Amino acid sequence: MTKNTLLNIAILLSRLLKAIVIIAAVAITSLFVYAQIDKETFAEKEIELSANPSIMRVSYIESNVWKDDTTDTEFDLKPYTFTKLNTVSLYINYFKILVVAVLLFLIIRAFETIILSVKTLNTFSRSNAKLFRQIGLYVVFVTILTSYTVLRFENGDQTLTHLSLTPVIYTLLSFIMAEIFKEGENLREENDLTI
Amino acid sequence: MPIVVNLDIMLVKRGMKSKELAEIIGITTANLSILKSGKAKAMRFSTLEAICKALDCQPSDILEYVED
């Protein structure tokens, strides 16, 4: 009974997280489209990459501002405004966020499938081992995508390099879980075929 | 697997049907079929004992080692 309650809570949380990821992706897309249509609203909005370093995480931000050669003026005092953001850079970062959202959705969906199989007493199956390996790979992709961000502006750029130990631990755990479930499947098969 | 289960031969010798044997030793016909087809990974001593008792034979009459 307790096990089922916990599993139901986990399934509910997974579904909630999936909904949040979808809402976030839709919201970002809406904002992205709105910013294209009505550029004036965000024209003077300053964009700044931020880092939150901790024991498990190392972040490094590099900001460069250069002189505009075409007009013989001084350094731009507000180089990181939305209107000065390079279009290619904007699109690349938007699609990067979307890909990360899709990967997060897939991670949560895989996790939900595993919990559902535990609930139906089909815990040790090859598909669960495969799902854990998939989760590990998705975490690797998310880590790669989020570890480096570049924003190019007309007269400057911002670069964020981000190295975190947490995804490495999650990836290792996922692969270890995949091996445990694979071994569990072998044991279950052996038990089923013992007459 | 180099271990061959000669259950079919013993059943013919004793004139017994698979279903009958399954009922006597208390296993399902599906499990007996797994045993006969050689798909089984292991056999419990209790099962072997029940088969030997039902067919009035020795374990060597049922199990045989054949090199691959």
Image (spheres, coloured by chain):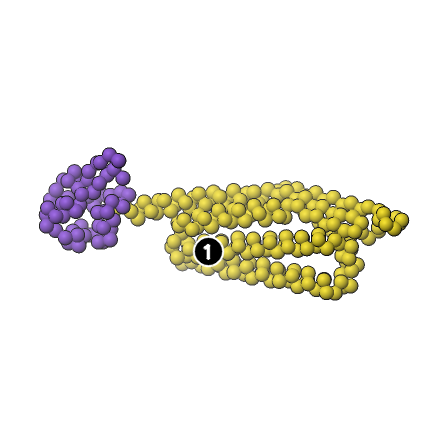
Chain colours: A yellow, B purple
Point out residue A47 in the picture as x, y percentages from the top left corner.
74, 54
Residue shown at the point (53%, 53%) measured from the top left: A107
Point out residue B55 in the picture as x, y percentages from the top left corner.
12, 46
Residue shown at the point (41%, 45%) measured from the top left: A182
Q: Which residue is mark 1?
A: A113
Point out residue B2 in the picture as x, y percentages from the top left corner.
25, 37
Q: Is residue A57 visible?
A: no
Q: Is residue B48 above or below residue A102?
A: above
> Of the residues shown, which amino acid type is indicated by label 1?
Thr
Q: Quadrant of the N terminus of chain A?
A: bottom left
Q: Is residue A118 above or below residue A175?
A: below
Q: Is residue A21 visible?
A: yes
Closest to the observer: A43 or A50?
A: A43
A14 with respect to A69 (left or right): left
Residue shown at the point (77%, 57%) measured from the top left: A83
Asked where in the image residue A23 lies, by quadrant, the reply is: bottom right
Residue furthest to the top in view is: B67
Residue shown at the point (17%, 54%) measured from the top left: B19
